[in-house]
Image (cartoon, rainbow, N blue to C red):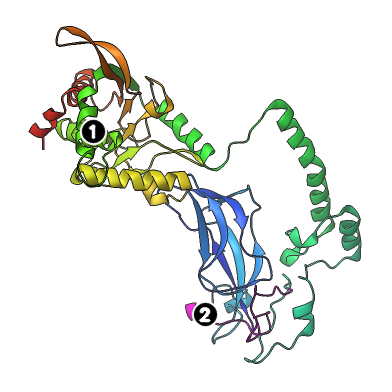
Amino acid sequence: MMPVVREFTLPDLGEGLTGAEVVRWMVEVGEVIAVDQPVVEVETAKAVVEVPCPYGGVVTARYGEPGEEVAVGAPLVTVAVAPVDGPTDAPGGGSAVSAAPATEVERPLVGYGVAEPGRSGRRRRVGVTGAAPVAVAAPVAPVAPAVSAAPAVVPVISPLVRRLAREQGVDLAALTGSGPDGLIVRADVERAVAAKVSAPAAQAAAVVEGVIPLRGLRKAVAEKLSRSHREIPAATCWVDADATELMALRRQLNSAPGPKVSVLALLARICTVALARFPELNSSMTEDGSGIIRHQVVHLGFAAQGERGLVVPVVREAQALTTEQLGEELGRLTEAARKGSLTPAELTGGTFTLNNYGVFGVDGSTPILNHPEAAMLGVGRIVAKPWVHEGQLAVREVTQLSFTFDHRVCDGGTAGGFLRFVADCVERPGTLLRQL
């Protein structure tokens, strides 16, 4: 029976993602892979993830080089798998790309370099061609000596093309042929030569001009911020607040046994209480801008600096968590951000964002909203300053609170009321008890 070539396309890796950038390939053409073995590492707008292939067999082609963008639904790899039964040709004489049942992927292709019993190490790569399928023998030991010993065979017929590639230092195995059945022709080699010549010049020009290409997360952030700035009529208001009592409360809480409570956790608790009082700010506009979506739960995003840059992890249903639970979840997500291990699900679906830019040693900011959210609270550094307290000049721990909001979902009175309530909770944390 003949092997069947299966095409595996890039799946949808998360909300609203349309593509991903190839970071590195984890398999080679000609390598035998198992069902659900990761074949490529890609970077989306949300995270770096490994993509497993649902087919087991021999990798016959890869699509996309590291740094290239692959669209969702576009081919990633093709795999030659062994059918269990049935014809190898599709009706009408076409290729049997989708004729075999799903169970076929669990059967190894005999003669394709499967490791021999008692031997360990990486699976052997074997030669494959794009011109015709390779016959599969009965389940006995491999019988084609050339298959196990020779390097991968590429679909090139013309000796002139091979000579040109050899003289110009072009690796034919790395090319995708534009001829019939993937045949590599002279034009393919010439394009590869031209690319080799132009690439260093382009890189040198980029270095001289200081051009840094937008890729992966940085590209996604740029597109999202541009859309937010373009579509959302945002306004910002701010107020200074005396955080002395809040910091005293934190010290009191942390003097008791149990997990430590962070300033961020206290601010997150204040945000959830404030949003219960001003629910119009836990909302977003419809895609066409014709209505307002009022969210029933608070999925609280917070800005975190990771190894891939600024990310916004999301605490799900933050309003239902205790202050201690909020602290634990914020800590877990912050650590994952530092390691670059956040999943797409942990980076999407926020309804409100808390931005503690005080950790960078700055007092104020007018941030761009995290589209499609309608509001963001910013908190500056908490620093000792002269302050009039109970009619007397004193040194107090002061912070600046800024609030950016979508002016379509509310007016300045609502936004000002929200910010004033937050400031009151910072200055008099006991105010929270009335709301819990």
Q: Who is closer to the viewer here, 237 or 174?
A: 237
**Type of amino acid under label 1:** Arg
Name the residue: 28% across, 19% down.
398
Q: From this viewpoint, is residue 404 visible?
A: yes
Q: Main secondary structure of the magenta part?
A: loop
Name the residue: 41% across, 30% down.
228
Does residue 235 appear to the left or right of 97 in the view shown? left
Q: Who is closer to the viewer here, 47 or 325?
A: 325
Residue 326 picture location, percent across and down: 26, 44
The magenta stretch is: 102-127
- The crowd level at tag 1 (other Cα within 10 Å; few <14, some 14-19, many 20+) is some
Q: Residue furthest left?
A: 434
* 54 up-or-down from 64: above or below: below
Name the element at disc 2: helix
Q: Is residue 126 magenta?
A: yes
Identify the mark at residue 251; answer none if there is no mark. Answer: 1
Q: Is residue 207 magenta?
A: no
Between the C-alphas of marks 1 and 2, the distance is 59 Å
**Which of the 4 quarters of the picture holds residue 374?**
top left
Name the residue: 84% across, 68% down.
157
Residue 33 picture location, percent across and down: 59, 72
